[in-house]
Each structure stands twice: as structure tokens, then as C-alpha cells.
Amino acid sequence: MADTDLAPELTPLADLILSFDHVAFGVRDLRAAAAFFATMGGAFLKGGDNRRAGFRWLQYVLPGETKVEAIAPVSEECFLHDFLERRGEGVHHLTFRVSDLEEAVRRAEASDLTVVGVFSEARTWKECFIHPRSAMGTVVQLAQWVDKDDPPPTLEAVLAGEIFSLG
């Protein structure tokens, strides 16, 4: 049997995953992250403050359409503050876009994956995380969202904390 011919019970999330979306880095300095992403040929895409979780984020698209994201705490109460203290800057999570978050959570848990941080209250953004113990030592985010046609913010507005996002 070829790897792509695995039985459906061995690939319970496969039909729900639309794409791999981005790699997110936990950082202390978003301006430095933005400069690094630009050095790598990246173009600023979007960003904002996530008030619910207490962090600011920005996203770049690199040559070849790969997206990278930098996330930084805006207060010491943010989960990222502890992450950076324990592990330092670096890869924080991998994000996969799914078609149905609730079904993805159900199937992940049925497959004995530890799912944490389920957020599905917003109409345009829903997410959960697969704990690193269940995902080869890396946090995996499953997210479902509605694409918007809003004009993108400027990098300076994001860095100044003037843009807020759902989530």
C-alpha cells in the first residue's frame, strides 16, 4: 500500500485539512521579526492584536507563497511570556486550515490526540491546538476562518497596536 493509499481510519483528519497555512514563531521583538522576514524576501500580509489571548501578531508571505507569522506577548499574563522564558524565541506552532473545526476536534480526540485551547465562539475565526505530547513535540493549530476582503493594515499600524483581530 502506498503512503497516499492509507485507509480512512488511519487518516481521520485528512479530508478536513484544506491546507498547511503557516509556521508561527514566538518572539520578543516584532519589529526585529518583521526585518528578518523582509530580509528573507517576505512581504507583509496582515496582523493585529489578539485581545482575548494577549498577544500581537504579524504575518508575512515569503517567496513561493509560504506564510510565516511572528507572535509576541503584550503583557506578562500572556501564555507567550512563559513560553519565551522557558524556551526562548523560536517555532511556536504549525497551523493547518480545516473545513470544520468542530468535526476536527471530535476526530482528533477520537484518535487519542490531546486537544486544548478550543475557541469556537467567533463567527469568522475558530481554533484548537493539538498538544505537543500528541504531535511530535510541536504545537499544532487547527483553524477555520472566513476570508475577508478588508484592506490590509499597514505594518506600522500593527506594530503600534492599532489593529485588533478576532480570536
Image (cartoon, rainbow, N blue to C red):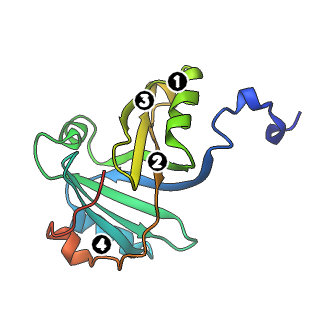
Residue in the picture at 26% in, 75% down: 155
Left or right: where 121 falls relative to 1: left
Q: Which percent across, then down, holds residue 69?
A: 38, 59
Q: Find the distance from the CA under tag 4 to the CA under tag 3.
A: 30 Å
Of the residues tagged 3 and 2, which is closer to the observer? 2
Q: Amino acid at mark 3?
A: His
What is the secondary structure assignment of the residue under circle 2?
strand
**Is there CB contact under 8 Å for labels 4 and 2?**
no
In this rendering, which labeled residue sits more in front, label 4 or label 1? Answer: 1
Is disc 1 in contact with disc 3, using a CB cutoff of under 8 Å?
Answer: no
Residue contact between numbered discs 4 and 3, judged by CB atoms under 8 Å: no
Q: Tell me the residue at 43%/72% (across/down).
A: 40
Residues at marks 2 and 1, CA–CA distance in whole angstroms? 16 Å
What's the CA distance linking mark 4 and mark 2?
Answer: 27 Å
Q: Which residue is mark 1?
A: 109
Q: Secondary structure at mark 3?
A: loop
Viewed as shown, does residue 98 lie left or right of 127? right
Type of amino acid at the residue the image marks with label 1: Glu
Q: Secondary structure at mark 4?
A: helix
Residue at the (34%, 43%) spot, across then down: 121
Around disc 1, counting alpha carbons within 10 Å, would you say few (fewer than 14), some (14 to 19), or many (20 or more)? Answer: few
Q: Which residue is mark 2?
A: 143
Query: Which residue, as the protein is rendered here, is positioned at the far right?
Result: 1
Seen as rendered, the residue at the extreme left is: 76
Q: Earlier in the sequence, mark 4 or mark 2?
A: 4
Q: Amino acid at mark 2?
A: Ala
Give the number of the disc on residue 35.
4
